[in-house]
Amino acid sequence: MEVRLADCAGFCFGVKRAVDTVYEQLKNGKTIYTYGPIVHNEEVVRELAEKGVRVLESKEELKSLKAGENIPTVIIRAHGVAKEIYDIMEANGLECIDATCPFVKKIHRIVEQKSTEGYHVIVVGDPKHPEVEGIVGWCQGPVTVLETPEQAEKFVKTEGEKLCIVSQTTYNYNKFQYIVEIFEKKGYNDSVVNTICNATEERQRSAKAIAAEADVMIVIGGRHSSNSRKLYEICQRECEHTYFIQTLDDLHLDLPKAVRLVGITAGASTPNKLIEEVQNYVRINF
């Protein structure tokens, strides 16, 4: 039986950069806070909590921090945050270290500029996802979040209104293209920027390619990870026996009788050591 890992799996550039930023700050002996979980992986967050990193879950918690003799250090998570969060930290005299993924930061600049130019911003993505909430928080004018093609079909713009369409970085590439086509058929193609990051596209393509060949597919990722869930959806369409796990403890394989190939992929917030644990376990036990 062959066990094959997708070419693009595990920590992406933005996630690695954010996690490394937290570990670097821990060396300074300060009390470290992150605004929201630094990444969407419970194992990573748990390990950081054991090292004393505290997670701020709301604006109210952030507002309660005040600069005294020791200035609290707050690290902005990889998903980014709304402009309002930076304003609160500045007003309270907090030290802000920005670990927002550069690809997400680029979207903030785009929507801020376009909205000040009078564009109605369309964000394609999950309205409840922190990345999307952050993007919306940089818009100075009208903004609409669309998650599905059905919502795009129903959308009607005001006469004379200009649209700027962007995407959550981890959104499904094919679904984004489909939504763009819907807007183009309506004549709503004023400004379209494909802001899905290259790592997401590559990860989805490589996962789909392996799943199409595999008898069994394992997707490793956090329960709340958007990009991991999308990998699972893509793999499930290609491979009937697809499993979504967060850690090795979740892996309970019910293998078909004849298994030639087990494919493995992992979301952008999944540590390499966890991927290696799953690979080794499957090779040794099946």
Image (cartoon, grey):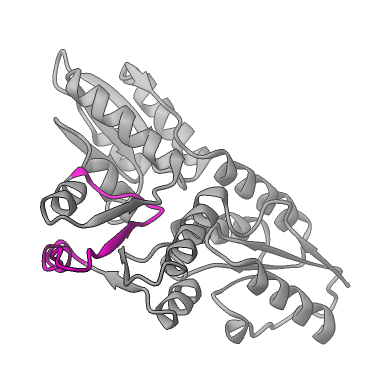
- Return the x and y of residue 222 as percentages of the image width and height: 48, 69
For residue 247, above or below residue 3: below
**Secondary structure mainly formed by the magenta segment:** loop
Q: Residue furthest front?
A: 69
Residue 120 appears in the rendering: yes
For residue 11, above or below residue 155: below
- Return the x and y of residue 111 as percentages of the image width and height: 28, 30
| Residue range corresponding to the magenta coloring | 58-83
For residue 84, above or below residue 248: above
Query: In which quadrant will I find the N terminus?
Result: bottom right
- Return the x and y of residue 180 as percentages of the image width and height: 41, 28
At a point 23% along the width and 46% down the height, the residue shown is 82
Residue 241 appears in the rendering: no
Tell me the quarter of the picture where residue 223 sits.
bottom left
At a point 18% along the width and 54% down the height, the residue shown is 89
- Return the x and y of residue 238 as percentages of the image width and height: 66, 56
Tell me the quarter of the picture where residue 159 sits.
top left
